[in-house]
């Protein structure tokens, strides 16, 4: 008998807990509201695209689209934060007495004004003035020597040899390859070993030292 009473008590407690949980869930669901609307400029009523919309105290939110439209789920009495570059941050509180599960509103944001530091605009010097300034500019010896070393032909050539072909060079090589194949299409392609011009270029490259290992 005691075991039957214990089982009955356990089932009763489980039923009560389930009822409380169901009521709490239904209460939470009833607090949810589909919040939709448009974000516009307060002065011109033009829509504001890509405004950031966030629920205060949480990581949930959304942003307005190209037409300034937004739609997301929030709870009654939630504080919604609207931010956008060039506009003042706006706080909007969802009413607690919203009828139904949908709420629509137009959010008007005010343009933010700020002060910039003073800017002095100087006209561009003429060519004669630029020549005059450069001719009288004295570089430190270290910088002058460094500039001379960087402009020597040998380091520049070594740097150029180490560079890979760019898109234009690769495209030119590929187009030339297509042209050669099309030129010799349907016939035997000449053997480079018997090409007198190729041998002449090879001998010239040997004499110039172009084929030396670097």
Image: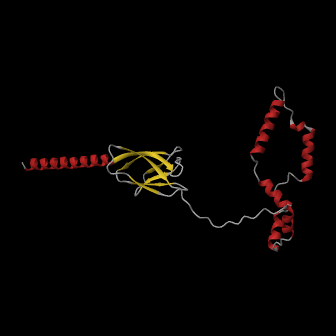
- Residue 75 position in % (x across, y down): 35, 50
Q: Name the residue at 81% across, 74% down.
A: 140
Q: Give the residue furthest to the left.
A: 1
Give the side of residue 89 with respect to residue 30, left or right. Answer: right
Left or right, 115 with respect to 23, comes to right
Q: Position of residue 12 (x, y in %)?
A: 15, 48
Q: Is residue 1 left or right of residue 173?
A: left
Query: x and y percent of residue 174 in the render?
Result: 77, 39
Image quadrant in which the C terminus is located:
bottom right
Number of labels in the image equals 0
Residue 39: horizontal and vertical position, in percent? 48, 48
Residue found at x 86% / y 60%: 153
Coloring scheme used: secondary structure
Residue found farthest to the front? 43
Is residue 125 placed above or below 140 in the rendered structure? above
Q: Residue furthest top?
A: 186
Q: Is residue 191 left or right of residue 165?
A: right
> In the image, is residue 113 above or below residue 20?
below
Q: Quick check: 58 above or below 175? A: below
The residue closer to the viewer here, 1 or 12, is 12
Return the residue nearer the eye: 138 or 67: 67
- Give the residue displayed 77% in from the left and 44% down from the top: 168
In the foreground, 139 or 72? 72
């Amino acid at each position: 008998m005691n075991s039957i009473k214990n089982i009955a008590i356990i089932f009763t407690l489980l039923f009560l807990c389930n009822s409380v949980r169901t009521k709490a869930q239904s209460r939470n669901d009833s607090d949810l509201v589909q919040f939709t609307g448009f974000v516009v400029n307060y002065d011109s009523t033009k829509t504001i695209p890509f405004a950031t919309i966030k629920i205060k105290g949480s990581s949930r939110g959304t942003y307005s689209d190209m037409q300034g439209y937004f739609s997301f789920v929030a709870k009654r009495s939630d504080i919604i934060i609207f931010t956008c570059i060039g506009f003042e941050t706006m706080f909007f509180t969802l009413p607690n007495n919203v009828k139904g599960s949908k709420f629509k509103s137009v959010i008007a944001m005010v343009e933010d004004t700020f002060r910039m530091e003073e800017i002095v605009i100087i006209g561009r010097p003429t060519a004669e003035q630029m020549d005059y300034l450069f001719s009288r500019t004295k570089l430190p010896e270290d910088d002058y020597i460094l500039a001379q070393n960087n402009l020597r032909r040998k380091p520049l050539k070594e740097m150029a040899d180490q560079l890979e072909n760019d898109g234009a060079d690769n495209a030119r090589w590929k187009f030339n390859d297509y042209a050669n194949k099309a030129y010799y299409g349907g016939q035997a392609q000449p053997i480079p070993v018997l090409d007198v011009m190729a041998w002449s270029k090879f001998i010239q490259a040997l004499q110039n030292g172009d084929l030396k290992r670097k």
